[in-house]
Image (cartoon, rainbow, N blue to C red):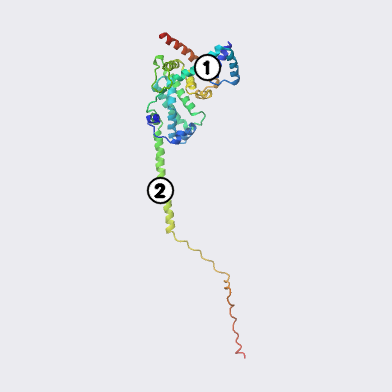
């Protein structure tokens, strides 16, 4: 509620607040744009966070998330529920991030990884979180995407396959490689941190 | 060599996404291989590290407004509201007009003209208990 006030949201229809994603998408497709506002309120933070983890820059992350929501609004009348709403949203965010990185050849340097402005940080061990962000920043974007979709967003392999447009077997092997790469980088960076102390 | 084959499956096993037969083979191997068990433990720690990195950002206050402006939300919403504001009074006016029309018909319309009764074909039956018509009087006086 507080967040809704902060975002200047007008009071939403109480029925929309209790509707599930499928109902909201259907309502939006049927010409009730206030259903889109409810979806926006539900998923804005996940979309921005995912984009931030991919791009390493809060402003770019918001731009990407904004673009993703615009595309969704335009495509909703044609959406037939092939995937769950968040899977659809994460697919667009991920593809926009990968495209944005390719266009601008962004490489997030380890020094550029800072603590983001946190809204809430339950159980955030700062050194662990910072080191993890450095490891993620050093990983190739496609591996980072698959790790985030699994570990941060909790998507199943099938949902990841839908989101990234990959066969299930490729998701399995790519995730395995991404985890191995993460572990190696983690060990390497932890050791260099130790040496610096 | 054997371990390397199993290690490919550790990630999917951890997520519960490994087919049952392969999972059973891997579990049999894990019971006898401390190295792979250690590998599995380390992989399971990655989820925790990534979640620790996943600090949710504080999204800008005007984020929603920017999105809604970009999609023309207020235009769509305004059109919908205009339609509603136009439709409602029109419905009320139509209802009032229909009501008035009904009243006018009720009070001012000419009373219905009764249809003419068809002419009686059969003579009406005499009332019960009436005397029969008198017979014509005979004048015998003149003959005598």
Q: Position of residue B8 (x, y in %)?
A: 55, 15
Density class for disc 1 (Cα within 10 Å; few <14, some 14-19, many ≥20) is many
Residue at 39% across / 14% down in the picture? A111
Quarter occupied by residue B131: bottom right
> In the rendered view of the protein, which quadrant contains the C terminus of chain A?
top left
Residue at 39% across / 42% down in the picture? B85
Q: CA distance from mark 1 to mark 2?
A: 69 Å
Q: Is residue A23 visible?
A: yes
Looking at the image, residue B113 sits to the left or right of residue B139; the answer is left
Question: In the image shown, does B27 or A64 lie closer to the viewer?
Answer: B27
**Subunit ID for the residue under disc 1:** A
Density class for disc 2 (Cα within 10 Å; few <14, some 14-19, many ≥20) is few
> In the rendered view of the protein, which quadrant contains the N terminus of chain A?
top left
Q: Is residue A177 visible?
A: no
Q: Position of residue A131 (x, y in %)?
A: 43, 15
Residue at 43% across / 49% down in the picture? B95
Q: Position of residue A103 (x, y in %)?
A: 43, 19
The secondary structure type at the circle numbered 2 is helix
Which residue is identified by label 2?
Answer: B93
**Subunit ID for the residue under disc 2:** B
Residue at 45% across / 24% down in the picture? A93
- Can marks 1 and 2 be said to lie on one chain? no
The disc at residue A133 is none
Q: Position of residue A40 (x, y in %)?
A: 43, 30
State the residue lying farthest toward the bottom.
B144
Which residue is identified by label 1?
Answer: A176
State the residue lying farthest toward the right.
B144
Quarter occupied by residue A119: top left
The secondary structure type at the circle numbered 1 is helix
């Amino acid at each position: 509620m507080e967040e809704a006030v902060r975002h200047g949201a007008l009071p939403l229809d109480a029925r929309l607040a209790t509707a599930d994603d499928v109902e909201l998408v259907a309502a939006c497709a049927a010409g009730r744009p206030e259903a889109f506002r409810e979806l926006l309120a539900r998923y804005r933070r996940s979309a921005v966070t995912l984009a931030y983890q991919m791009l390493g820059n809060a402003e770019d992350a918001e731009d990407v998330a904004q673009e993703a929501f615009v595309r969704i609004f335009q495509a909703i009348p044609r959406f037939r529920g092939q995937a769950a709403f968040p899977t659809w949203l994460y697919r667009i965010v991920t593809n926009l991030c990968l495209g944005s990185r390719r266009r601008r050849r962004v490489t997030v340097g380890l020094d550029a990884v800072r603590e983001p402005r946190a809204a809430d940080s339950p159980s955030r061990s700062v050194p662990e979180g910072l080191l993890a962000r450095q490891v993620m920043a050093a990983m190739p974007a496609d591996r980072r995407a698959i790790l985030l979709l699994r570990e941060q967003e909790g998507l199943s392999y099938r949902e990841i396959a839908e989101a990234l447009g990959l066969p299930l077997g490729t998701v399995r092997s790519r995730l395995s490689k991404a985890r191995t790469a993460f572990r190696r980088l983690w060990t390497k960076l932890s050791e260099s941190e130790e040496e610096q102390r | 060599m054997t371990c390397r084959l199993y290690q490919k499956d550790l990630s999917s096993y951890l997520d519960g996404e490994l087919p049952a037969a392969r999972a059973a083979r891997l579990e049999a191997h894990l019971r006898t291989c401390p190295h792979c068990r250690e590998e599995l433990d380390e992989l399971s720690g990655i989820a925790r590290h990534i979640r620790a990195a996943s600090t949710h950002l504080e999204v800008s206050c005007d984020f929603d407004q920017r999105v809604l402006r970009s999609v023309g939300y207020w235009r769509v919403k305004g059109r919908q509201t205009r339609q509603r504001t136009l439709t409602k009074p029109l419905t009320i006016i139509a209802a009032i007009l229909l009501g008035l029309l009904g009243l006018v018909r009720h009070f001012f319309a000419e009373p219905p003209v009764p249809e003419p009764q068809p002419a009686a074909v059969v003579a009406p039956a005499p009332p019960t208990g009436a005397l029969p018509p008198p017979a014509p009087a005979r004048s015998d006086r003149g003959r005598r």
